[in-house]
Amino acid sequence: MNNLHFKPKDILTNPNQIEEDLSLERTLRPQSFNEYQGQEKIKENLKILIGAAQHRREPIEHVLLCGAAGLGKTTLAHIIAREMGAGIKVTSGPAIERVGDLGSILTNLTEGDVLFIDEAHRLNKLIEEVLYPAMEDFKLDIVIGKGPSARTLQLDLPHFTLIAATTRPGLLSSPLRSRFGITFRLDFYQLADIENIISRSAKLLDIKTQTEAIKLIATAARSTPRVANRLLKRVRDFAQVRGDGAISGPLSKEALAMLEIDQLGLEPVDRQILNLIIEKFDGGPVGLQALAAAINEEQDTIEDLYEPFLMQLGFIVRTPRGRVATRQAYEHLGLKYLDSNQNKLL
Ligand code: ADP
């Protein structure tokens, strides 16, 4: 409980992209719908959308992809562009600082291109306003000059498809949200999909793995492909030092224990959050602000990084008065749950 110094970037199961992922992701990123595991409904819908658009010889409608970090939004955007036979330009909400930045991105697109904006909830409002006419009418309004002599010039843009990704759809302004033709919500993955992802990655990285090891790594991967690939790599490193490089069941168990990742994929900081809610705040409800202060972390980090998976496991519930730990959380930590706690969930 005293060790409260974990920072998101040090955390192995952090689903956000960190530097070591970059080269790994280049090798492992699926290039087609066939290679992209799971999310079957979304793939089906996209195939229809793309097929129909190709039939009409038009770009597809603007697409909004929502879902926790590491679930495959960027990968999907690249696959959509490839299936459309289109080029893709990649940027992100915080990278577009000035209206001029967006202007130059938009005017450099060619007909049919995909523009991928990651972290779209972090676009500033002025930029959003320039996006509206660009998305709707493929027009860009540029203001030339200042004061009374200022003039507005309207440029025609090529027909493009905006694919925006966000971990926090609730933070997108409603005018922006309403301009997407279609929204997809990516769910956490089924265990079998994560197992397939790990098997595929092991093959691509030429790592020998036993079925039992794949199962163990998959259950610890927080139902998230990025975490699955990162864990595979760590267990491989462990196997190279401790064994002959092949990954057996017992060896992966040992590696995960050394990394302090439990059988559900929780690591020390997750368990600290649960322990705090249970012990310091008597099981909750506790407000996000108080929780963040208690673990010395940003509120956004808790909301973006830890909570989604703890909620997915059913360990935390959000109530109007704050976060409450559930019976499953107590049981996972080996703590006694009083039935009277049940009232807190209401
Ligand atoms: P996001 O943009 O949602 O944060 P990414 O698209 O960058 O996530 O995915 C992270 C990594 O996880 C990718 O590089 C890829 O290797 C892997 N990945 C994601 N989704 C899938 C999938 N459905 N099948 C196989 N691998 C996947």
Image (cartoon, rainbow, N blue to C red):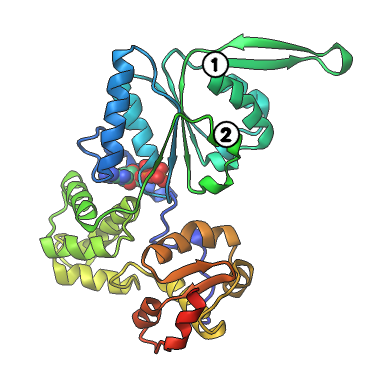
Q: CA distance from mark 1 to mark 2?
A: 15 Å
Element on which disc 2 rests: helix
The reply to whether residue 24 is visible in this rendering is: no
- The residue that label 2 is drawn on is 176
Q: Residues within 10 Å of mark 2 (few under 14, many from 20)?
A: some
Considering depth in this image, is 196 or 231 the residue closer to the camera?
196
Q: Give me the residue at 57% from left, 20% from top.
A: 134
The image quarter in which residue 342 lies: bottom left
Q: Tell me residue 184's x, y (percent).
A: 39, 40
- The residue that label 1 is drawn on is 138
The reply to whether residue 203 is visible in this rendering is: yes
From the viewer's perspective, is 149 left or right of 20?
right
Q: Is residue 212 above or below residue 58?
A: below
Considering depth in this image, is 320 or 244 the residue closer to the camera?
320
Q: The disc labelled 1 sits on which kind of residue?
A: Phe
Q: Is residue 40 above or below residue 331?
A: above
Q: Earlier in the sequence, mark 1 or mark 2?
A: 1
From the viewer's perspective, is 227 left or right of 36?
right
Q: Tell me residue 236's x, y (percent).
A: 23, 59
